[in-house]
Amino acid sequence: MTTMLAGQAADARAKGEALIRQADALLCESWNEKMWANGGPIDPSPTVDQAVNGGHRWLQIECSRCRTKREVDLTALRHPPTTAVHDLASRLRCSKCAKAGRRPPATLLQLTPLPRQAAPET
Ligand SMILES: [Zn+2]
């Protein structure tokens, strides 16, 4: 009986985790749609751990000054995982502009499962 209940607990937990992953993925997709349609509002947004858990670990950003685009790996950030994605806008800097002594904020574009340049550079 104990083993059976433990098995049921494991099953229920796995199902629950799958549902949360699904909810997190949907949250990322609905935020993306808001970004594509209107460019915002960026707040509210998923948290970093929701985005990662939902399989959208890459954040595409664009420099508001020079328009250079890049992808940020959310799992590589030093910010706490409870940080909302929109709070990163003012913290992520363009390295090109930083060299020129500027610190323009980043424009957030979308959350994606894979980086845009997934193919190896040739
Ligand atoms: Zn720039």
Image (cartoon, rainbow, N blue to C red):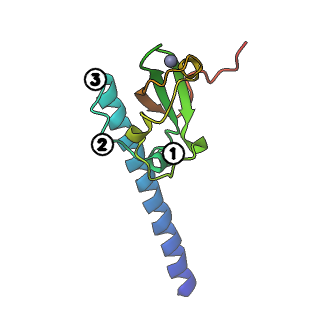
Q: Position of residue 76 (x, y in %)?
A: 61, 42
Tell me what residue is drawn at x 49 percent, y 51 percent.
81
Q: Is residue 8 above or below residue 35?
A: below
- Mark 2 highlights which residue? 44
Badge 3 or badge 2: first in the primary sequence: 3
**Residue type at mark 1?**
Val
**Residue holding disc 3:** 37
Badge 2 amino acid: Pro
Image quadrant assignment for residue 40: top left
- Whole-angstrom CA distance, mark 2 to mark 1, is 17 Å
The quadrant of the image that shows the C terminus is top right
Q: Upstream in the sequence, badge 3 or badge 1? A: 3
Identify the residue under disc 1: 52
Q: Residues within 10 Å of mark 3 (few under 14, many from 20)?
A: few
* Element class at badge 3: helix
Q: Residue at x 62, y 24 (%)?
A: 118
**Of helix, strand and loop, which one carries label 1?**
helix
Nearer to the camera, 29 or 95: 95
Q: Tags 3 and 1 in contact by the CB under 8 Å rule?
A: no
